[in-house]
Amino acid sequence: MSSTNWIRRQVNDQYVSLAKKEGYRSRSAYKLIEINDKFKILQRGRFVLDLGSSPGGWAQVASKNTAIIDSTEPTVVAVDIQSMEDIHNVSFVQCDIDSDHDLLNEKLSGRKFDVVLSDMAPKSCGHRQVDHANIINLCELARDIALEYLNPNGSFVTKLLHGEYEQEFKRSIMPHFSVVSYFKPKSSRKDSSEIYLVALKFKG
C-alpha cells in the first residue's frame, strides 16, 4: 500500500478517530474491547501478560479492566522488542521473546498469569502465504509462552491470518484448553484476513 493510500485510509477510519478521541494509542484497542465484551477474559484483579504490546493499545485496555483499586502492584506485564511509553498499572519488559527467553524468564520471575494476549504480527512482505507462515511462527511462540505462564482456567488470545496452517495451529491449542474458537472483531479492517483465536479454561 502506498503512503498516500495509507494516509487516506487512516483519515477515513472511524476507529483511528475514536482512538485519538478516547486516548487509546492504537485502533487495535477496540479489537480487544470487542473480544472482552464477548468472552469476559479481563476482569478486576486478573493478571495479564501482553506480548507484542507496543505502542500499548491492548495494554491500556487490559489495565483499565484489571487494575486493583488502592493497589500499587501492576496487573499487566507488557512485552515488546520495541520501546513503549509508560502506562499506568503496566510493567514493561523490552526484549525479543524469540531470542531473549532467558531474559523474559528472569523478568517474570516465575510469575503466573490469568490471561496471555498476543496481537503480534510480522511486517508484511505482500505475499499472502509467506505472511501467513510468518504470523503462525509468532502464534507458536505466543502459545508456548502461554502454556508456560498461564494459571489453570486461564485464557489465551492470539492474532493470526487465514491460511493453510490455521487449522493445524488450532489443533495444537485444543488439548490444552476446554474452549477454543475464532473471533473476528467488527473493528478489524474489512479487507484484512486477520482473525483471533480465543482459548478459554486452560487445563494446566
Image (tube, grey):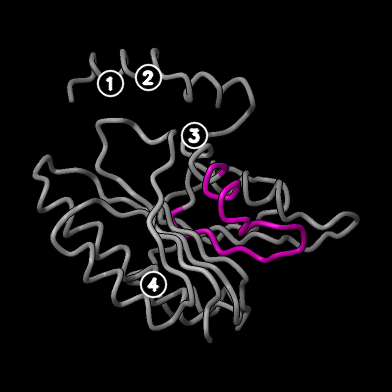
Determine contact: label 4, label 3, CB under 8 Å.
no
Q: Which residue is mark 1?
A: 6
Left or right, 131 with reference to 188: left
Q: Which residue is mark 3?
A: 26
- The residue located at (48%, 41%) in the rendering is 31
Q: Which residue is mark 4?
A: 143
Q: Which residue is mark 2?
A: 10
* CA gap, disc 3 and disc 1: 15 Å
Determine contact: label 2, label 1, CB under 8 Å.
yes
* CA gap, disc 4 and disc 2: 31 Å
Q: In which quadrant of the rendered view does residue 184 lie?
A: top left
Marks 2 and 3, the one that precedes in the sequence = 2
> Which residues make up the magenta segment?
33-52
Marks 3 and 1, the one that precedes in the sequence = 1
Neighbours of disc 2 within 10 Å: few (<14), some (14-19), many (20+)? some
Looking at the rendered structure, the secondary structure element under dot 2 is: helix
Q: Is residue 41 magenta?
A: yes
- The residue located at (52%, 65%) in the rendering is 116
Looking at the rendered structure, the secondary structure element under dot 3 is: loop
Q: Position of residue 187 (x, y in %)?
A: 44, 33
Q: Callout 1, which amino acid?
A: Trp
* CA gap, disc 4 and disc 3: 24 Å
- The residue located at (46%, 67%) in the rendering is 199
The numbered dot on residue 105 is none
Neighbours of disc 4 within 10 Å: few (<14), some (14-19), many (20+)? many
